[in-house]
Amino acid sequence: MNETDQVLSNSNVVWSTPSINSAGSMPIGNGDIGANVWIEENGDLLLLISKTDAWDENSRIVKLGRVRISLSPSPLRATAAFRQELKLREGVIEVSCGEGPAFTRLLIWIDANRPVIRVETESAQPCEATVKLELWRTQKRTFHDFEWFSCWNMCGLDGANRPPEVQCFITPDTVADVAGRLAWYHRNEYSVWPIGMKLQGFESLMGQLADPLANRTFGAAIIGKGLVKKDPCTLQSGQASHTHGISIFPLTAQTATAADWLNLLDASIRDVDSVPVPQARQMHAQWWKAFWDRSWVRVAGSPDTDRVTAAYTLQRWISACGGRGAYPIKFNGSIFTVEWREGDTVKSDPDYRTWGGDYWYQNTRLPYWPMLAAGDYDLMMPLFKMYTDTLPLAKARNRIWFNCDGAFLPETMSFWGLFSNGDYGWKREGRHVSDMSNPFIRWIWSSGLELSMLMLDYYEHTQNEKFLKEMLLPWADAMLLHFDTRFARDAAGKLVITPSQAVETYQEGVTNATPDIAGLHAIVQRMLALPAGAADAATRTRWQRLQQAVPDLPMVAHDGKQYIVPAEKFGERGNCESPELYPVYPFRLYGVGKKDIEIGRDTYAVRIEKAFNGWQQTSGIAACLGLTDEVKSMVVANSKEQDKGSRFLAFWDRHYDWIPDQDHGGNLLTAVQAMLMQTEGKRILLLPAWPSDWDVDFKLHAPYHTTVEGTFRNGKLERLAVTPESREKDVELIPANQEPQRLGQR
């Protein structure tokens, strides 16, 4: 094992005892298919299986099911040695039990290139294998009171006003009658899609858009060589063997009939099995090797730095395991939620997650910002695709609701683009079609600008012209058109953006919210800087007019200092964010190496909200401002925010959302990266907030197909490799709390 592999293996998770239940599970996935994996004290292997597109009829993303694999004789005895290891480099979980003639090994992996879960066993003594399917959706039933929070689309803040005729049910799975294998599925025989379309004023569009939930069918088949079907939910080996191979084939598809889905499943199995398992395993390992080789951050020197390295590495693992599917990472648990437990009490089935299946953009964005510097561009495409796919509906919303052009991004959104019905409001008497009932999210306009910022960064990194034309330009231009055609101008020709709100925190009496103004300044300037020919002359002229209409950032002066405020006009606080710091992050108008950084630092110093975990982006803001001591302490604290009920280190506490909290993990990665490197255009600012007493080895990605690799030890940059070499001239070394310095001046 070379040094690089050894350092990565130091972050492997190793357990020397089995687990009691799913709270002691390890996550594994291939980007679309996932599993929580654990060994119970009786030696059984459990897999709680998930998929990124398993949307039920109520727009909840739910589990496929649970599989129990038992070996007889059991590999786990009271005196047996036990080791369960998540091997990051290979992308596998390996379990070994016993020694000598009692030795048994299990290998669990989800093929990085194909839709299949593999479980391989080998044992010194022949053993029999039993595979059982365990389902909990076994009958039609209504939601329990607290369960409505996992069905936010049909609940929301206005759930109490849901009409009695709007009924939602949890419906049962079907175990299929097929020979030689276990097969099961959940099929959506009804859909909440028409309810939302009619409620929110889009009934006229229903013939033009397809229902994304109706007839959606998801499930899996289980096959194993030598395994015989004993009953509809059980496979058992015909005879004892030294080895067993068990394969689980998940599938989601919208089909006219259940029989059509089963035929597609058969075709998928044939396609997967056309590649021999040893060859597929080798290709799987190659994918994970390439993933870990593309980027890393390894901090050393103390128990705190070891924890930061492990937290950074394992969060990136979780993102990769759930980030290449049909839909973006769910901020409230990704695909790795388990039963809700309070002590010894099980309060829910594995499908529960607070805030349900809707996407809150202010939360959804946070796992994605660090993917740029990590070079994980493939993981970003599900986010961009989901939102750009909603543009036709979003443009229709602007026409129907506001009689204006363009589009805006709803803050709480189903994956097809509607607001959560309960946030939109069930009780419509006397309300205009555009009148939202949820005051926390009804007038947030900055989200679409922030996604434009992320898209612009993606384009700068990849120089992908197809992405520019097909995603970035249509999206960003629609967001700008919303502001250009929706809002009035004052006597000086400046936009008067009202109604508005400064994210969720300032909800009433807001004019020219700072996130909106900062976003417009940042986005219009960058759109105008796109290559000549990216947009036609008329579009560029429109952007230039809009640029002239954007007001200055709202500020106040006090004791000779200037401070950014949340909006030009605003009322009382209604939540716990810092909208006045959006000009620092995500819109990067102030920061290290930029003009007037003291305005950003002074504003940060007087911020009201001091929290920095969960979706609070405080640590990233501190890094952008070069506040080394601040961000160092936050990163250390956040790396230790493991959920107390979970065994896996990077299953973060629920904070404001659910377990494992992907906002918390995303912010942690962003902060560490921004401590090491910040970029703006072609400038690469190195070590802008890195503490002198932390050693680090890193490889990060910068715009224009650039990688920056370095080693910092004993307070000095010992090694730097920039690819391509021509970009080294753009690197500026910034010792902590000092001004930038060209590397040539060292």
Image: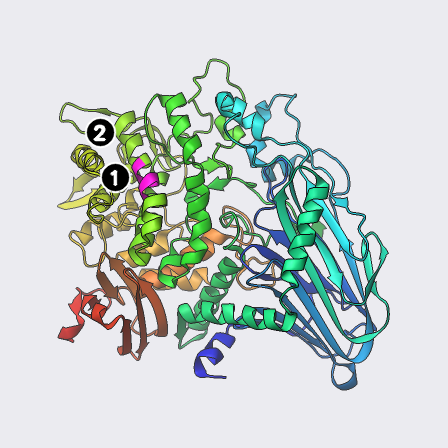
Residue shown at the point (40%, 21%) measured from the top left: 400
Name the residue that disc number 2 marks: 495
The residue range painted magenta reads 472-477
Can residue 367 be seen at all in this image of the molecule?
Answer: no
Name above or below for residue 170 compared with residue 666. Answer: above
Mark count: 2
Q: Quadrant of residue 78?
A: bottom right
- Relative to residue 399, is residue 627 drawn left or right? left
Describe the element under mark 2 as helix, strand or loop: strand
Label 1: few (<14), some or many (≥20) within 10 Å? many
* Pointer 2 local density, CA inside 10 Å: few below 14, some 14–19, many at least 20: many
Q: Main secondary structure of the magenta part?
A: helix
Q: Amino acid at mark 1?
A: Leu
Query: Residue flagged by tag 2: what amino acid is it?
Result: Leu
**Residue located beneath label 1 in the image:** 520
Asked whether the residues under the numbered discs 1 and 2 touch, taking CB atoms below 8 Å apart as contact, a structural biologist would say yes
The answer to whether 20 is drawn above or below residue 465 in the figure is below
Q: Secondary structure at mark 1?
A: helix
Residue 90 in the image: x percent, y percent?
55, 72
- Judge left or right: residue 560 versus residue 147: left
